[in-house]
Image: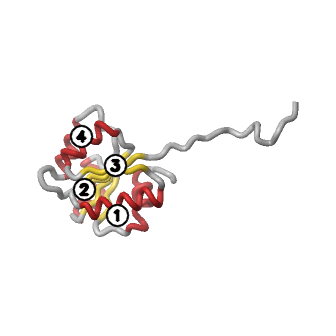
């Protein structure tokens, strides 16, 4: 039997990360989605409100959620409270995307159980690296 140099190679399957982006501003959703899909190759699901985001979190089971803090109807704090109260989705890590500077404070973030916070306006070129760093992902 002839052995080739390829017989001993392990097959590694890459799994694509799925990220749920919850933001009431369509233009922000679009930019975040484009960055995550085009730069990192991650799959992105979007939601326009906190309520829709919770429904999609249960249905889609994303690997992470990028969450706007200031949305009408249900703000980010209420979203996080409801997420953490649901055993089906409470383990999904959350990265905040916020214009409120006080939410970028690490003590405040830890108290909420948030993986990290990115200030708005954000740099689209750096966004993927920031998200990956907070979540401990490599890409």
In the drawing, does residue 56 fall left or right of residue 19? left
In the drawing, does residue 3 fall left or right of residue 47? right
| Residue that label 4 marks | 55
Q: Quadrant of the N terminus?
A: top right
| Residue that label 1 marks | 31
Q: Are marks 4 and 1 in contact (CB under 8 Å)?
A: no
| Residue that label 3 marks | 45
Determine the secondary structure under disc 3.
strand
Picture coordinates of residue 133, whole percent (x, y)? 44, 56
Q: Are marks 2 and 4 in contact (CB under 8 Å)?
A: no
Which comes before the other along the chain, label 1 or label 2?
A: 2
Determine the CA span between mark 2 and mark 3: 11 Å
Toward the left, the furthest residue is 73
Toward the top, the furthest residue is 1
Determine the secondary structure under disc 1.
helix
Is 15 situated above or below 117? Answer: above
Which comes before the other along the chain, label 3 or label 4?
A: 3
Which comes before the other along the chain, label 2 or label 4?
A: 2
Residue neighbourhood size for the residue with mark 3, other residues' Cα within 10 Å, grouped as few (<14), some (14–19), many (≥20): some
Q: Residue at x 51, y 53 (%)?
A: 139
Picture coordinates of residue 79, whole percent (x, y)? 20, 46
Toward the right, the furthest residue is 1
Determine the CA span between mark 2 and mark 4: 14 Å
Determine the CA span between mark 1 and mark 3: 13 Å
Determine the CA span between mark 4 and mark 1: 22 Å
Q: Observer-nearest residue: 6 or 134?
A: 6
Q: Residue at x 72, y 40 (%)?
A: 9
Which comes before the other along the chain, label 1 or label 3?
A: 1
Q: Observer-nearest residue: 138 or 48?
A: 48
| Residue that label 2 marks | 23
Please identify the quarter of the rendering in which residue 81 is found.
Answer: top left
């Amino acid at each position: 039997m002839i052995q080739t140099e390829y017989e001993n190679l392990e097959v590694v399957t890459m799994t694509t990360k799925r990220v749920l982006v919850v933001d009431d501003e369509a233009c922000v959703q679009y930019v975040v989605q484009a960055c995550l899909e085009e730069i990192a190759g991650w799959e992105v699901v979007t939601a326009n409100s906190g309520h829709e985001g919770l429904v999609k979190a249960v249905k889609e089971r994303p690997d992470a959620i990028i969450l706007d803090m200031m949305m009408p109807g249900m703000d980010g704090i209420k979203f996080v409270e409801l997420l953490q109260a649901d055993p089906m989705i409470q383990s999904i890590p959350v990265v905040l995307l916020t214009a409120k500077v006080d939410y970028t404070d690490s003590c405040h973030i830890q108290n909420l159980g948030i993986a990290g916070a990115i200030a708005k306006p954000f740099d689209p070129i750096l966004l993927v690296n920031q998200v990956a760093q907070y979540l401990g992902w490599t890409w």
